[in-house]
Image (cartoon, grey):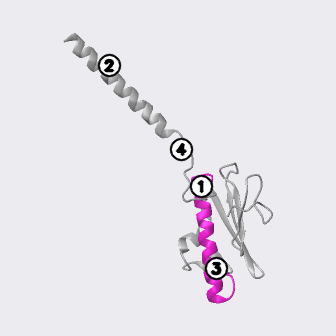
């Protein structure tokens, strides 16, 4: 009887220890899993920022085809392609802030991280559709391309 009680006690301690170890492992930050072959993102935040940029760039391309000019604002792009009104009106995009600036026969789109580091690069794109990134300063046309 005494041995049975000791075994149960030890089994209980072992089970609690294993659950604790599982919780610690579950809370450890997982490395980023690419979403598709050639995915240039380094983190989930970057993947979301790049996805937003691609959505805006596709919408601008469709808008230009339909109206023979680029949109003057994100709001005027709403409803074009996959760009929703909510996406156009909300510049706060999680760990990033979106910025759209029209210019003569084009536009500039930027995604600026709230904290820049190796997993939160800044991004920049114009009407040519190429996305540029930089992890030290705001990205611009001279920054390396990510596509």
Q: Nearer the viewer, residue 85 or 23?
A: 23
Identify the magenta region.
42-71
Looking at the image, is mark 4 or mark 1 nearer the viewer?
4
> Which mark is first along the chain, 4 or 3?
4
Q: Residue furthest bottom?
A: 67
| Residue on which disc 4 sits | 30
- Tell me the SS state at disc 1: helix
- Please say if the residues under marks 3 and 2 sit with CB atoms less than 8 Å apart: no
Label at residue 10: 2
| The C terminus lies in quadrant | bottom right
Check residue 34 for magenta coloring. no
| Residue on which disc 1 sits | 45
> Which mark is first along the chain, 1 or 4?
4
- Tell me the SS state at disc 4: loop
> Which mark is first along the chain, 2 or 3?
2
Q: Nearer the viewer, residue 105 or 130?
A: 130
Distance of label 4 from label 2 (alpha carbons): 32 Å
């Amino acid at each position: 009887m005494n041995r049975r009680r000791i075994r149960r006690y030890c089994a209980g301690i072992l089970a609690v220890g294993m659950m604790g170890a599982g919780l610690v492992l579950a809370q450890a930050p997982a490395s980023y899993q690419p979403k598709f072959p050639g995915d240039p993102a380094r983190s989930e935040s970057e993947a979301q920022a790049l996805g937003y940029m691609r959505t805006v760039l596709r919408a601008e391309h469709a808008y230009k085809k339909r109206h023979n000019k680029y949109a003057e604002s994100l709001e005027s792009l709403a409803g074009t392609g996959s760009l929703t009104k909510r996406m156009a009106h909300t510049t706060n995009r999680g760990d990033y802030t979106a910025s759209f600036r029209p210019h003569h026969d084009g536009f500039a789109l930027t995604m600026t991280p709230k904290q820049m580091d190796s997993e939160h690069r800044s991004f920049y794109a114009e009407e040519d559709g190429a996305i540029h990134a930089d992890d030290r300063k705001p990205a611009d046309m001279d920054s390396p391309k990510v596509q």
